[in-house]
Protein backbone atom coordinates (compact mmCIF):
# COMPACT_ATOMS: atom_id res chain seq x y z
CA UNK A 1 0.00 0.00 0.00
CA UNK A 2 1.42 3.39 -0.95
CA UNK A 3 0.26 7.01 -0.89
CA UNK A 4 -0.25 8.62 -4.30
CA UNK A 5 -0.05 12.16 -5.61
CA UNK A 6 -0.25 13.82 -9.01
CA UNK A 7 3.29 14.46 -10.32
CA UNK A 8 3.19 16.03 -13.77
CA UNK A 9 1.41 16.49 -17.10
CA UNK A 10 3.14 15.60 -20.37
CA UNK A 11 3.22 17.93 -23.39
CA UNK A 12 4.73 16.89 -26.70
CA UNK A 13 6.43 19.95 -28.20
CA UNK A 14 7.70 20.66 -31.69
CA UNK A 15 9.53 23.95 -31.09
CA UNK A 16 11.80 23.86 -28.05
CA UNK A 17 12.96 27.46 -28.40
CA UNK A 18 9.49 29.00 -28.21
CA UNK A 19 8.35 26.42 -25.66
CA UNK A 20 11.30 27.21 -23.35
CA UNK A 21 10.55 30.93 -23.70
CA UNK A 22 6.93 30.40 -22.68
CA UNK A 23 7.56 28.27 -19.62
CA UNK A 24 10.65 30.12 -18.38
CA UNK A 25 9.99 33.73 -19.36
CA UNK A 26 6.19 33.95 -19.40
CA UNK A 27 5.07 31.53 -16.70
CA UNK A 28 8.24 31.96 -14.66
CA UNK A 29 8.90 28.24 -14.24
CA UNK A 30 12.39 26.82 -13.74
CA UNK A 31 14.05 24.00 -15.65
CA UNK A 32 14.32 21.29 -12.99
CA UNK A 33 16.13 18.71 -15.13
CA UNK A 34 16.80 17.95 -18.79
CA UNK A 35 17.56 14.52 -20.22
CA UNK A 36 18.50 13.36 -23.72
CA UNK A 37 17.78 9.85 -25.04
CA UNK A 38 19.26 8.21 -28.13
CA UNK A 39 16.32 5.87 -28.75
CA UNK A 40 12.61 5.71 -28.04
CA UNK A 41 11.27 4.86 -24.58
CA UNK A 42 10.23 1.20 -24.23
CA UNK A 43 7.12 2.36 -22.36
CA UNK A 44 6.34 4.79 -25.23
CA UNK A 45 6.93 7.76 -22.90
CA UNK A 46 7.83 9.86 -25.96
CA UNK A 47 4.95 8.54 -28.08
CA UNK A 48 5.12 6.05 -30.98
CA UNK A 49 8.61 7.12 -32.04
CA UNK A 50 11.82 5.11 -31.83
CA UNK A 51 14.36 7.85 -32.55
CA UNK A 52 16.24 10.42 -30.50
CA UNK A 53 14.18 12.46 -28.04
CA UNK A 54 14.48 14.61 -24.94
CA UNK A 55 12.57 15.24 -21.75
CA UNK A 56 12.57 18.55 -19.87
CA UNK A 57 10.86 18.95 -16.50
CA UNK A 58 9.75 22.51 -15.67
CA UNK A 59 7.94 23.81 -12.62
CA UNK A 60 7.76 26.39 -9.85
CA UNK A 61 9.76 24.22 -7.47
CA UNK A 62 11.14 20.71 -6.85
CA UNK A 63 9.15 17.73 -8.09
CA UNK A 64 8.95 16.39 -4.53
CA UNK A 65 6.28 18.93 -3.64
CA UNK A 66 5.25 20.68 -6.88
CA UNK A 67 3.15 19.66 -9.86
CA UNK A 68 5.32 20.12 -12.94
CA UNK A 69 5.19 19.91 -16.73
CA UNK A 70 7.11 17.32 -18.72
CA UNK A 71 8.09 18.68 -22.14
CA UNK A 72 8.76 15.85 -24.59
CA UNK A 73 10.61 16.68 -27.79
CA UNK A 74 11.09 14.18 -30.62
CA UNK A 75 13.85 15.15 -33.03
CA UNK A 76 12.42 15.59 -36.52
CA UNK A 77 8.79 16.06 -35.41
CA UNK A 78 7.69 19.67 -35.97
CA UNK A 79 4.16 19.68 -34.58
CA UNK A 80 1.43 17.49 -33.13
CA UNK A 81 -2.27 17.26 -33.88
CA UNK A 82 -4.28 18.31 -30.83
CA UNK A 83 -7.30 16.36 -29.69
CA UNK A 84 -10.25 17.69 -27.71
CA UNK A 85 -9.35 16.10 -24.37
CA UNK A 86 -6.93 18.61 -22.81
CA UNK A 87 -8.80 21.78 -21.83
CA UNK A 88 -6.11 23.64 -19.93
CA UNK A 89 -3.98 24.13 -16.84
CA UNK A 90 -5.00 26.78 -14.31
CA UNK A 91 -2.42 28.53 -12.17
CA UNK A 92 -2.44 31.51 -9.80
CA UNK A 93 0.39 33.90 -10.60
CA UNK A 94 0.17 37.65 -10.95
CA UNK A 95 3.84 37.49 -12.00
CA UNK A 96 2.95 35.30 -15.00
CA UNK A 97 0.27 37.80 -16.06
CA UNK A 98 2.78 40.63 -15.70
CA UNK A 99 5.41 38.68 -17.66
CA UNK A 100 2.98 37.97 -20.49
CA UNK A 101 2.04 41.63 -20.77
CA UNK A 102 5.67 42.73 -20.70
CA UNK A 103 6.65 40.24 -23.41
CA UNK A 104 3.45 40.97 -25.39
CA UNK A 105 2.42 37.33 -25.19
CA UNK A 106 -1.27 37.10 -26.22
CA UNK A 107 -3.71 37.22 -23.29
CA UNK A 108 -7.50 37.13 -23.32
CA UNK A 109 -9.48 37.95 -20.18
CA UNK A 110 -12.16 35.24 -19.96
CA UNK A 111 -13.41 36.12 -16.47
CA UNK A 112 -12.61 38.82 -13.96
CA UNK A 113 -8.91 38.46 -13.19
CA UNK A 114 -8.54 35.26 -15.24
CA UNK A 115 -6.60 35.30 -18.50
CA UNK A 116 -6.42 32.64 -21.19
CA UNK A 117 -3.17 32.16 -23.06
CA UNK A 118 -1.57 29.46 -25.17
CA UNK A 119 1.75 27.68 -25.02
CA UNK A 120 3.43 26.91 -28.35
CA UNK A 121 1.57 23.98 -29.88
CA UNK A 122 -1.83 25.33 -28.84
CA UNK A 123 -1.97 24.11 -25.22
CA UNK A 124 -4.23 26.41 -23.18
CA UNK A 125 -3.31 27.94 -19.83
CA UNK A 126 -5.54 30.00 -17.52
CA UNK A 127 -3.69 32.55 -15.42
CA UNK A 128 -5.36 33.94 -12.32
CA UNK A 129 -4.05 37.43 -11.64
CA UNK A 130 -3.28 36.74 -7.99
CA UNK A 131 -0.71 34.92 -5.92
CA UNK A 132 -2.01 32.51 -3.31
CA UNK A 133 -0.25 31.86 0.02
CA UNK A 134 0.75 28.34 -0.98
CA UNK A 135 3.88 26.68 -2.28
CA UNK A 136 2.64 25.71 -5.73
CA UNK A 137 0.84 28.13 -8.10
CA UNK A 138 -0.51 25.25 -10.24
CA UNK A 139 -4.15 24.77 -9.24
CA UNK A 140 -5.62 22.18 -11.59
CA UNK A 141 -5.55 20.35 -14.93
CA UNK A 142 -8.85 20.26 -16.81
CA UNK A 143 -9.71 17.26 -19.00
CA UNK A 144 -12.80 16.64 -21.12
CA UNK A 145 -14.58 13.31 -20.62
CA UNK A 146 -17.44 11.66 -22.47
CA UNK A 147 -19.20 10.19 -19.43
CA UNK A 148 -18.71 11.93 -16.07
CA UNK A 149 -20.19 9.07 -14.02
CA UNK A 150 -17.96 6.46 -15.67
CA UNK A 151 -14.89 8.69 -15.27
CA UNK A 152 -15.62 9.32 -11.59
CA UNK A 153 -15.93 5.59 -11.00
CA UNK A 154 -12.55 5.07 -12.63
CA UNK A 155 -10.58 7.96 -11.09
CA UNK A 156 -12.16 7.68 -7.62
CA UNK A 157 -13.13 4.04 -7.09
CA UNK A 158 -10.15 2.52 -8.89
CA UNK A 159 -7.41 5.15 -8.64
CA UNK A 160 -8.39 6.42 -5.21
CA UNK A 161 -8.89 10.13 -5.90
CA UNK A 162 -11.14 12.25 -3.72
CA UNK A 163 -14.00 14.39 -5.06
CA UNK A 164 -13.54 17.96 -3.83
CA UNK A 165 -16.29 19.57 -5.90
CA UNK A 166 -19.06 18.20 -8.10
CA UNK A 167 -21.64 20.00 -10.26
CA UNK A 168 -24.19 17.64 -11.80
CA UNK A 169 -25.87 20.40 -13.79
CA UNK A 170 -22.65 21.50 -15.48
CA UNK A 171 -21.34 17.92 -15.58
CA UNK A 172 -17.98 18.61 -14.02
CA UNK A 173 -16.02 17.60 -10.95
CA UNK A 174 -12.77 18.55 -9.20
CA UNK A 175 -10.65 15.60 -8.05
CA UNK A 176 -7.37 15.17 -6.25
CA UNK A 177 -5.32 12.92 -4.02
CA UNK A 178 -5.50 13.37 -0.28
CA UNK A 179 -4.03 10.66 1.94
CA UNK A 180 -5.47 7.84 -0.14
CA UNK A 181 -3.83 4.43 -0.13
CA UNK A 182 -3.99 2.33 -3.29
CA UNK A 183 -3.48 -1.41 -3.76
CA UNK A 184 -1.25 -2.82 -6.44
CA UNK A 185 -2.58 -1.07 -9.53
CA UNK A 186 -1.74 -3.60 -12.17
CA UNK A 187 -3.45 -6.48 -10.35
CA UNK A 188 -6.45 -4.26 -9.60
CA UNK A 189 -6.84 -3.21 -13.23
CA UNK A 190 -6.60 -6.81 -14.41
CA UNK A 191 -9.33 -7.85 -11.99
CA UNK A 192 -11.52 -4.97 -13.14
CA UNK A 193 -10.84 -5.66 -16.87
CA UNK A 194 -9.40 -2.18 -17.35
CA UNK A 195 -6.89 -1.21 -20.05
CA UNK A 196 -3.20 -1.46 -19.17
CA UNK A 197 -1.14 0.30 -21.82
CA UNK A 198 2.23 -0.68 -20.37
CA UNK A 199 2.50 -3.41 -17.70
CA UNK A 200 5.06 -2.94 -14.94
CA UNK A 201 8.39 -2.08 -16.57
CA UNK A 202 11.73 -0.65 -15.45
CA UNK A 203 12.91 2.47 -17.28
CA UNK A 204 16.52 3.61 -17.36
CA UNK A 205 17.71 7.21 -17.52
CA UNK A 206 21.41 7.53 -18.44
CA UNK A 207 23.44 8.31 -15.33
CA UNK A 208 20.37 8.40 -13.09
CA UNK A 209 18.02 6.10 -11.18
CA UNK A 210 15.99 3.32 -12.78
CA UNK A 211 12.27 3.70 -12.09
CA UNK A 212 9.38 1.26 -12.34
CA UNK A 213 6.19 2.41 -14.05
CA UNK A 214 2.74 1.14 -14.97
CA UNK A 215 0.79 3.05 -17.63
CA UNK A 216 -3.01 2.88 -17.70
CA UNK A 217 -5.79 4.40 -19.81
CA UNK A 218 -9.04 5.77 -18.41
CA UNK A 219 -12.42 5.24 -20.17
CA UNK A 220 -11.65 8.12 -22.57
CA UNK A 221 -8.13 6.94 -23.33
CA UNK A 222 -6.29 9.49 -21.18
CA UNK A 223 -2.91 7.95 -20.38
CA UNK A 224 -1.96 7.78 -16.70
CA UNK A 225 1.57 6.81 -15.69
CA UNK A 226 2.22 5.59 -12.15
CA UNK A 227 5.83 5.55 -11.00
CA UNK A 228 7.55 4.00 -7.98
CA UNK A 229 8.17 6.55 -5.25
CA UNK A 230 11.65 5.77 -3.92
CA UNK A 231 13.49 5.64 -7.26
CA UNK A 232 11.49 8.59 -8.59
CA UNK A 233 12.65 10.78 -5.70
CA UNK A 234 16.22 9.98 -6.69
CA UNK A 235 15.56 10.55 -10.40
CA UNK A 236 13.65 13.79 -9.88
CA UNK A 237 16.25 15.68 -7.85
CA UNK A 238 16.66 19.22 -9.18
CA UNK A 239 19.67 19.47 -11.49
CA UNK A 240 21.28 22.92 -11.17
CA UNK A 241 22.64 22.43 -14.71
CA UNK A 242 19.20 21.64 -16.13
CA UNK A 243 18.63 24.97 -17.86
CA UNK A 244 22.12 24.95 -19.38
CA UNK A 245 21.67 21.36 -20.59
CA UNK A 246 18.45 22.40 -22.35
CA UNK A 247 20.12 25.44 -23.93
CA UNK A 248 23.08 23.35 -25.07
CA UNK A 249 20.78 20.71 -26.58
CA UNK A 250 18.77 23.33 -28.45
CA UNK A 251 21.97 24.93 -29.78
CA UNK A 252 23.25 21.55 -30.95
CA UNK A 253 19.97 20.61 -32.64
CA UNK A 254 20.45 21.38 -36.33
CA UNK A 255 17.31 19.60 -37.50
CA UNK A 256 15.54 22.83 -38.49
CA UNK A 257 18.51 23.82 -40.65
CA UNK A 258 18.65 20.36 -42.25
CA UNK A 259 14.97 20.36 -43.17
CA UNK A 260 15.21 23.93 -44.51
CA UNK A 261 18.30 23.09 -46.56
CA UNK A 262 16.57 20.10 -48.13
CA UNK A 263 13.32 22.05 -48.56
CA UNK A 264 11.36 19.52 -46.55
CA UNK A 265 8.85 20.07 -43.74
CA UNK A 266 9.28 18.37 -40.39
CA UNK A 267 6.91 15.49 -39.79
CA UNK A 268 3.67 16.00 -37.87
CA UNK A 269 2.85 13.82 -34.90
Image: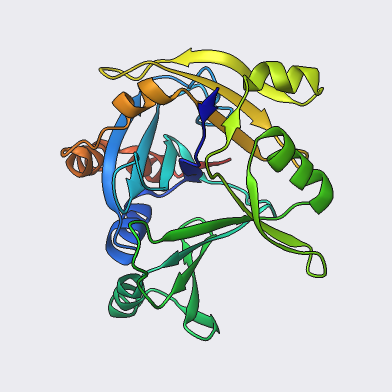
- Quarter of the rendering occupied by the C terminus: top right
**What's the residue at 56%, 31% (across, down)?**
225
Q: Left of 220 or right of it: where is 38?
A: left
In this rendering, is residue 212 above or below 143?
above
The image position of residue 7, as x and y in percent, is 46, 40
* Residue 242 can be seen, yes or no: yes
Q: Residue furthest bottom?
A: 112
**What's the residue at 27%, 63% (across, down)?**
25
The image position of residue 39, as x and y in percent, is 43, 19
Could you tell me how many numbered marks the image carries?
0
Query: How was the colour assigned to the protein in this rendering?
Result: rainbow
Q: Left of 67 or right of it: where is 122?
A: right
In this rendering, is residue 215 above or below 212?
below
The image position of residue 54, as x and y in percent, is 37, 33
* Residue 147 can be seen, yes or no: no
Of 50 and 95, nearer the camera is: 95
In this rendering, is residue 126 above or below 58?
below
In this rendering, is residue 119 above or below 262?
below
- Quarter of the rendering occupied by the N terminus: top right
Of 46 and 109, nearer the camera is: 109
**What's the residue at 37%, 22% (across, down)?**
230
Of 196 and 51, nearer the camera is: 196
Of 174 and 264, nearer the camera is: 174
**What's the residue at 63%, 22% (across, down)?**
183
The quadrant where residue 214 appears: top right
The image position of residue 264, as x and y in percent, is 48, 42
Amino acid sequence: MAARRALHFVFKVGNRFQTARFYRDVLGMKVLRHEEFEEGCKAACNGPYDGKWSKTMVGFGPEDDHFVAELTYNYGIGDYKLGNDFMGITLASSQAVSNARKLEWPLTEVAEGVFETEAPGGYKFYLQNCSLPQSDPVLKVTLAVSDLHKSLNYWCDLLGMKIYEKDEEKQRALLGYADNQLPDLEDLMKRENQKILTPLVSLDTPGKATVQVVILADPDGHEICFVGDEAFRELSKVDPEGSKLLDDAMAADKSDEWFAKHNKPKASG
